[in-house]
Image (cartoon, grey):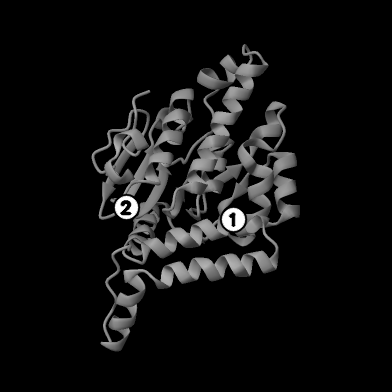
Amino acid sequence: MRHLPGQPQDLPGNRASLGHYAARHFLFSVDAGVATLTLHRPERKNPLTFDSYAELRELFRALAHADDVKAVVITGSGGNFCSGGDVHDIIGPLTQLDMPGLLAFTRMTGDVVKAMRACPQPIIAAIDGICAGAGAMLALASDIRIGTARSKTAFLFTRVGLAGCDMGACALLPRVIGQGRAAELLYTGRSLAGAEAERWGWLNRLVEPEELGDAAQLFATGLASGPTFAHGMTKKMLQQEWNMGVDEAIEAEAQAQAICMATNDFHRAYHAFVAKEKPQFEGN
């Protein structure tokens, strides 16, 4: 696969623009600081392939260096989010691999989640219809989930004889909905419908299907116009503090906040407050 912009060997100053990146295995565009990534195989409910996994991993790694992207929306086309790994393109071939090959694959899929959690931009998942298996993990690795009442989320791994611990599910899902509810979904593989998903805290909000795209874009645009350096720091601390004690977390936050206080955005906010104006953040 060709190098994406954002690889250190390609970048002066280790910064890059992704506005003109031409995705090969999904749709991708950047507008007003918001990158929209659309899984686009509607005839199969947008399943993932070996190639799309690899491109997702490299794209989210590149986003760590993209100075023209302030927030990300990930969604699917044709009324569905993602049906998981493609049965014919992935599941079948996996039955023919040896252990080193299987481990290489499972590490690659996990690297997608690692890259999503490591990129500084907030990620908003816009979920309609089927959101299953690896697709549910893409939604779980996002920061915000906006969905519809007709959405159906399922961690299907046990339905095909696999453990429910795929791609970090056993670590991340309890953080979102709690240990007991996570255990129920991961043991049974049952579907979580939209209204229940909102009650459980899986979805941040419910909207009508025809409003989903606009709602996700509006949320992302609001974040993109905000103090994006501070948003990146917030995301980093949400990730790091899970493995810290309270005293460690308080000290880490003291350091993180002191760094943010040295930014121009902090000074812009102060001067705007004094002038009784709305601050215009620039992400630095």
The residue depicted at 54 percent of the width and 42 percent of the height is 114
Q: Which mark is residue 240?
A: 1
In this rendering, the answer to whether 25 lies above or below 220 is: above
The N terminus: image quadrant? top left
Evaluate whether residue 105 shows in this view. Answer: yes
Q: Residues within 10 Å of mark 1 (few under 14, many from 20)?
A: few
Q: Is residue 262 left or right of residue 137?
A: left
Q: Position of residue 109 (x, y in %)?
A: 55, 32
Quick check: can you spot residue 77?
Answer: no
Q: Position of residue 166 (x, y in %)?
A: 65, 36
Q: Are marks 1 and 2 in contact (CB under 8 Å)?
A: no
The kind of residue on which mark 2 rests is Val
- Amino acid found under the numbered disc labelled 1: Gln
Is residue 180 or residue 15 the one in the foreground? 15
Q: Real-space Cα distance between discs 1 and 2?
A: 25 Å
Which of the 4 quarters of the picture holds residue 186? top right
Question: Which of the two discs, 1 and 2, labels the residue nearer the N terminus?
Answer: 2
Q: Quadrant of residue 201?
A: bottom right
The disc placed on residue 34 is: 2
